Amino acid sequence: MLSIKTLRKVYGGTVAVDGISFDVGSNEIVGLLGPNGAGKTTTINMVLGVLEPDAGTIHIEDLDVALYRSRAIARTNFAAAYTPLPGNLTVSQNLRIFGRLYGVRDLSKRIEELLKQFDLAAFREKKCGVLSSGEQTRVSLAKAMLNRPHLLLLDEPTASLDPAAAREARANIREFTLQGTGGVLWTSHNMYEVEEMCDRALFLSHGRILLEGNPNTLPAEHGTKTLEELFITVAREPLTLEVG
């Protein structure tokens, strides 16, 4: 679904992403992990075409994002805790507008499916700006599923949800991954969530991939008891984990 090769982005004298390469396969959830400032969101923004890389290539399926951005981005969708939908529009208005932007067929039917799936039917005529943060997150996830994307990009998607709502959201994302052919690139600071959801995890530090592997076996491979301990080690002492 996604292939990144030697991707690099520099802001002034700061290297935000330093020549990283990785893939996301069909029916795969890949966790992109690391402390704040590691390069996760910059990477996602380059995949979305919001930022232009200084070097490297991004392919979404067979399409080079640099050459065929519109066609490539039409196959993706995105949700993040820090990008709420327009607050002056109702839930149904937001879904309808984004559905039109993505050219979703049978849009009214698709909206009804998502309102039910994310338990949003009672909020359809409420403006998004008056919803709780958890309710807004559910609307963002519904928006992200509108076009049945081939590549789903999730940046801290459950950060503002209570445990029960987060569990339901994870179940919906897992169902999306297993039932279709899509892949997911997921950033999170919740290591328990990563262990539950991700098939692979990539640890970033200072724009470079330090570690990669199964999140359930990586800790033991690097001398820590839990994925959270490994995350802290990456954040505080990345040089002790330098590979290659």
Image: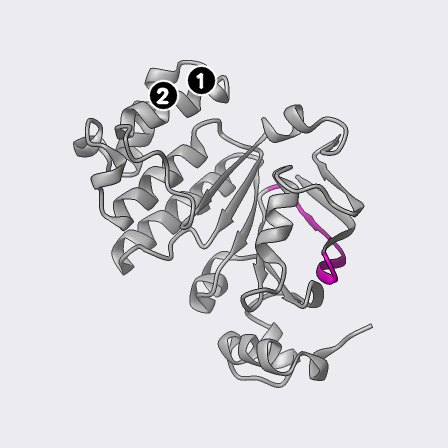
- The image position of residue 134, as x and y in percent, is 28, 49
Mark 1 nearby-residue class (10 Å; few <14, some 14–19, many ≥20): some
- The image position of residue 64, as x and y in percent, is 76, 33
Q: Nearer the viewer, residue 179 or 10?
A: 10
User: Does the magenta portion include 3?
Assistant: no
- Please tell me which residue is depicted at 51% across the width and 42% down the height of the picture: 177
What amino acid does circle 1 point to? Arg
Tag 2 residue: 96
**Left or right of 162 on screen, residue 198:** right
Query: Splitting the image into 4 quarters, where does residue 95 fall?
Result: top left
Is 200 drawn above or below residue 127 in the view shown?
A: below
- Please tell me which residue is depicted at 26% across the width and 39% down the height of the picture: 129
- Per the model, the C-alpha gap separating discs 1 and 2 is 6 Å
Is 155 drawn above or below residue 141 in the view shown?
A: below
Asked whether the residues under the numbered discs 1 and 2 touch, taking CB atoms below 8 Å apart as contact, a structural biologist would say: yes
Q: In what element is the residue under mark 1?
A: helix
State the predominant SS element of the stretch in magenta. Answer: strand
Magenta stretch? Answer: 12-26
User: Does the magenta portion include 22?
Assistant: yes
Tag 1 residue: 100
**Left or right of 161 on screen, residue 65:** right
Q: In what element is the residue under mark 2?
A: helix
